[in-house]
Image: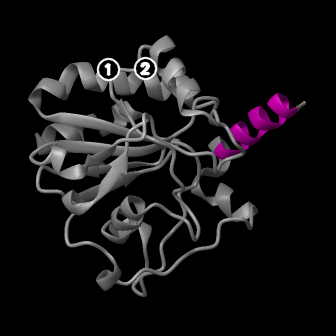
Amino acid sequence: MRILLIIKLCILFLFLGENFITMFPFFKKITVLKSELKPSLYDYNVKSLNGSDVSMSTYRNKVLIIFNSASKCGLTKNHINQFNELHEKFNDKGLEILGFPTYQFFSQEFKQSCDISQFNQEKNIKYNVFAPVEVNGENTHELFKYLKFNCDEMHDENGVLDNIGWNFGKFLVDKNGNVVKYFSPKLSPLNMEKDITDLL
């Protein structure tokens, strides 16, 4: 029954797009001031799946795709396949793909990091996957606050951040750490290819 509900919700999202999230009141929009953010994307730290700190400065001079993921979503298979394709095509030219699991969309992610790691191995995921984070609401991870605030499509003039509509909202970042564009979950990763090549 639960699986059927999730499938129906995924289909509904594909029809409604980013408006899907407005049907659900559990993500409160938050306001962020520029003074609350660190000066650069590279000043943030994230956690690896094994719990160690990773500085985003590791990815200086790289084009980045940063996205929220889930292992049990209807969009997962297509995104894994196409992210792997982009990785194979552009990683040696300077593209890094960074996935951040989240439980926020109907708990479509494993609760344990070891299970996420096992899933990644089974699916032969070639890109980087980090520890789970929240991407909407009051507990939004600081990196995702920064990404939204520095992306024109994801905030208003008062600093109110938009919510990411579902699993696999994708931010494209240039080699200098500037957020260039946001791609909604319903857009497949290969739709990003021209924008990626323009930045490499």
The amino acid type, in three-letter code, at marker 2 is Asn
Q: How many marks?
A: 2
Left or right of residue 134, residue 177 in this image: left
The amino acid type, in three-letter code, at marker 1 is Glu
Which image quadrant is residue 107 in? top right
In percent of width and height, residue 53 lies at: 32, 47
Q: Residues within 10 Å of mark 1 (few under 14, many from 20)?
A: some
Which image quadrant is residue 116 in? top right
The kind of secondary structure element at disc 1 is helix
Left or right of residue 81, residue 3 in this image: right
Residue located beneath label 1 in the image: 85
In percent of width and height, residue 171 lies at: 35, 51
CA gap, disc 2 to disc 1?
6 Å
Left or right of residue 66, residue 6 in this image: right
Q: Residues within 10 Å of mark 2 (few under 14, many from 20)?
A: some
Compare residues 187 and 116 and report the one nearer the observer: 116
* Position of the C terminus by quadrant: top left
Residues shaded magenta: 2-13
Q: Residue at x 59, y 67 (%)?
A: 137
Q: Main secondary structure of the magenta part?
A: helix
Residue 11 colored magenta? Answer: yes
Residue at the extreme right: 1
